[in-house]
């Protein structure tokens, strides 16, 4: 698998990059990608919802009135679920929504996604992307020739200037090789990846 390496912002070809077919030319495994994506999103859920049962609500230790003779319904505690200030019948408790995904499955899903991006010509190999200053305007000028609404920039080493320049752009995401995840790959329209970053991805997923 060969990719044309281009230089931003002129988008001039500077060479070709040979990539391993085992990583960037795999068949798209939709069930595997779906399972890994659901597991990733489930792991991001907070799961901190909590309510109190009648045993956890404060107060209600004594019987509010005697059993007979008052004309009112029988009541044993003011913390009964029937009362406005009582506990919940089926109270929600904090839980862990995460799902187990084997390392082999996760890497297989990433290989499938990268291969599909290459087939759809949505991945762009570029020379090292560097900015002279952490200015959003400079980054917009670099990416001006890329016609895409959502762009994912994958760099070999995270640069502080590049990170600050992209912070004000809601549709631009910058991440290092170790932070690449299936959600970002699936939601972006184009992937701009440095040559060194693609080589590292090839080593990790091989």
Image (tube, rainbow, N blue to C red):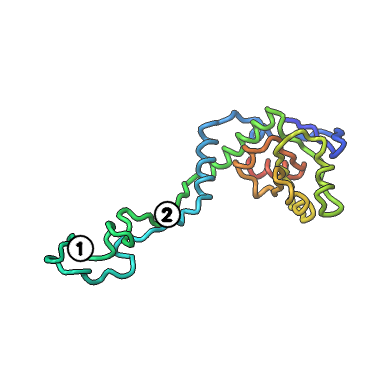
User: Residue 48: x and y, percent?
Assistant: 46, 57
User: Residue 162: x and y, percent?
Assistant: 78, 51
Which quarter of the picture shows residue 201? top right
Could you say which is closer to the camera, residue 204 or residue 180?
180
Query: Which residue, given by chain and number where applicable, does mark 2 sit on?
Result: 95
User: Residue 3: x and y, percent?
Assistant: 76, 32
10 Å crowding of disc 1: few (<14), some (14-19), many (20+) = some
Which quarter of the picture shows residue 2? top right
Q: Earlier in the sequence, mark 1 or mark 2?
A: 1
The local secondary structure at tag 1 comes to loop
Residue 75, numbered label: 1
Q: Is residue 78 left or right of residue 128?
A: left
10 Å crowding of disc 2: few (<14), some (14-19), many (20+) = few
Could you say which is closer to the camera, residue 148 or residue 4?
148
Establish if 200 lies above or below 1.
below
The local secondary structure at tag 2 comes to loop
Quarter of the rendering occupied by the C terminus: top right
For the point 18% across and 60% down, the residue is 73
Between the C-alphas of marks 1 and 2, the distance is: 33 Å
Of tags 1 and 2, the one toward the viewer is 1
For the point 31% across and 61% down, the residue is 86
């Amino acid at each position: 698998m060969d990719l044309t390496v281009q230089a931003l912002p002129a988008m001039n070809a500077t060479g070709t990059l040979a990539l391993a077919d085992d990583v960037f030319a795999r068949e798209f495994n939709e069930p595997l990608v779906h399972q890994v994506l659901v597991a990733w999103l489930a792991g991001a859920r907070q799961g901190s919802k909590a309510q109190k049962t009648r045993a956890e609500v404060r107060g209600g230790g004594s019987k509010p009135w005697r059993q007979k003779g008052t004309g009112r319904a029988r009541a044993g505690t003011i913390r009964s679920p029937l009362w406005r200030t009582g506990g919940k019948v089926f109270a929600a408790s904090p839980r862990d929504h995460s799902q187990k995904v084997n390392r082999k499955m996760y890497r297989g899903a990433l290989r499938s996604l990268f291969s599909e991006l290459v087939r759809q010509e949505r991945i762009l190999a570029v020379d090292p992307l560097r900015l002279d200053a952490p200015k959003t305007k400079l980054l917009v000028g670099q990416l001006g020739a890329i016609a895409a609404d959502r762009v994912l920039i994958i760099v070999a080493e995270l640069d502080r200037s590049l990170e600050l320049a992209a912070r004000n752009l809601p549709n631009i995401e910058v991440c290092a090789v170790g932070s690449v995840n299936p959600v970002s790959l699936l939601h972006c329209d184009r992937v701009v990846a440095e040559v060194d970053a693609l080589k590292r991805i090839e080593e990790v997923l091989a």
